[in-house]
Image (tube, rainbow, N blue to C red):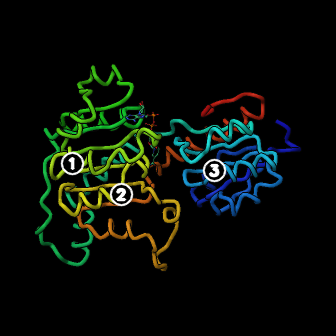
Amino acid sequence: MNSKNPVKVAFFSTKSYDQEYFDQANQDLSITYFEASLDEQTVNLCEGYEVVCAFVNDKLDNAVLDRLHAYGIKLIALRCAGFNNVNLDVAKELGIKVVRVPSYSPEAVAEHAVALMLSLNRKTNKAYNRVREGNFSLHGLVGFDLYKKTVGVIGTGKIGQAFCRIMKGFGTRVLAYDLYPSEALAEDGVEYVSLEDLFKNSDVVSMHCPLTPDSSHLINEQTISMMKPGVMLINTSRGGLINTKDVIAGLKSRHIGYLGIDVYEQEESLFFKDLSAHIIQDDLIMRLISFPNVLITAHQAFLTQEALSEIARTTLENIHAFEQGELQNSVY
Ligand code: NAD
């Protein structure tokens, strides 16, 4: 490492917790923290840097990648697992390498999915507000035992596996669907079934697969109609897995009994920002918020101390490896 010429990193979509954990872990990189997210309007901030560090809602599309190439950026260091926000074909063509943090704390995300399930079921969010106002009535707070219910898990990679293990601990029957089933999970009693059987038999469906052309709008009018009436749907993966309009129709008809989401298809213009004094223009999210049986968190499933430390450590290691001519945690 050349301490006189530290690698210059342009860091986008910075929040105070990012800076805190990266500053703790960083020894020799020169990091400039931009609050702005990366898109066509802000890409000019990258001039003079060597590496761009981006997060889930930074837009690394054709136009942005072209400009990064023109500025001589050779590496995009994603500080997240998903990479659906990067046009990889264009990055490859331009010779820009893309690295990520494939696994920082699968348990952080799995546990948040469980938090959504339990809050929706036992309505602790409502109870909290009621009790604070001196309302000790239990009316409308009836939940159900998770014990012996059937939970369907779509995608049994790192997060899906952690989620399945927690669900087995709750005494539920766990059905799973994945393109590549895990033998270890099957040995632990998780039953791999077809997607159709999973939808037909699950009381709770939880999404843990990545967003790809194949999985885009996997939850739509047709798949919702296969699900049990009153089903609980949980999505901590990516918003695009769900066709929001169809889910709203499912909630209105009461076919969907509960919806818990940490991600939303149009989240880029909303999440990670305080918009409490603004008139929100997105009518779909406002409709979702209006349902009493919908719980939305703003992409916080990853947000634990352990995950933030691991994200900072791996991202910095990825950049150091690249500097030394090696590629670590590359997405292609
Ligand atoms: P992973 O790569 O370990 O596992 C993904 C699994 O999905 C794999 O087993 C893969 O075979 C399977 N899969 C791929 N396409 C599928 C399809 N069409 N149908 C069914 N299964 C399919 O990934 P992971 O670390 O478990 O993360 C899963 C997803 O969680 C990420 O892609 C990301 O979108 C999301 N995520 C969200 C947060 C958050 O804060 N909300 C944080 C991290 C990751």
Q: Is residue 277 above or below residue 194?
A: below
**The C terminus sits in image quarter:** top right
Residue at 53 percent of width and 36 percent of height: 102
Q: Earlier in the sequence, mark 3 or mark 1?
A: 3
Q: Is residue 63 above or below residue 205?
A: below
Query: In the rendered structure, which disc, 2 or 1, sits on the residue that comes first in sequence?
Result: 1
- Apparent side of residue 233 relative to residue 156 in the rendered image (left or right): left
Residue 159 position within the rendered picture, expressed as x and y whole percent measured from the top left? 40, 37
Name the quadrant where ligand 1 sits.
Answer: top left
The percent position of residue 317, horizontal first and vertical second, equals 67, 36
What residue is at 26 percent from the left and 47 percent from the top? 222
Q: Amino acid at mark 2?
A: Thr
Query: What's the CA distance linking mark 2 and mark 3?
Result: 23 Å
Q: Give the residue drawn at x 73%, y 36%.
A: 320
Which element is circle 1 on? helix
Q: How many marks?
A: 3
Task: Report x, y in % for residue 2.
Answer: 85, 38
Question: Which residue is identified by label 2?
Answer: 244
- The one nearer the camera, 93 or 150, is 93
Is residue 274 placed above or below 176 in the rendered structure?
below
Residue visible at 76% across and 59% down in the picture: 44
Q: Specify the amino acid type for callout 1.
A: Ser
- Screen quadrant of the N terminus: top right
Question: What residue is pinned by disc 3?
Answer: 61
Spatial distance from mark 3 to mark 1, Cα to Cα? 35 Å
Q: Which residue is mark 1?
A: 225
Q: Amino acid at mark 3?
A: Asp
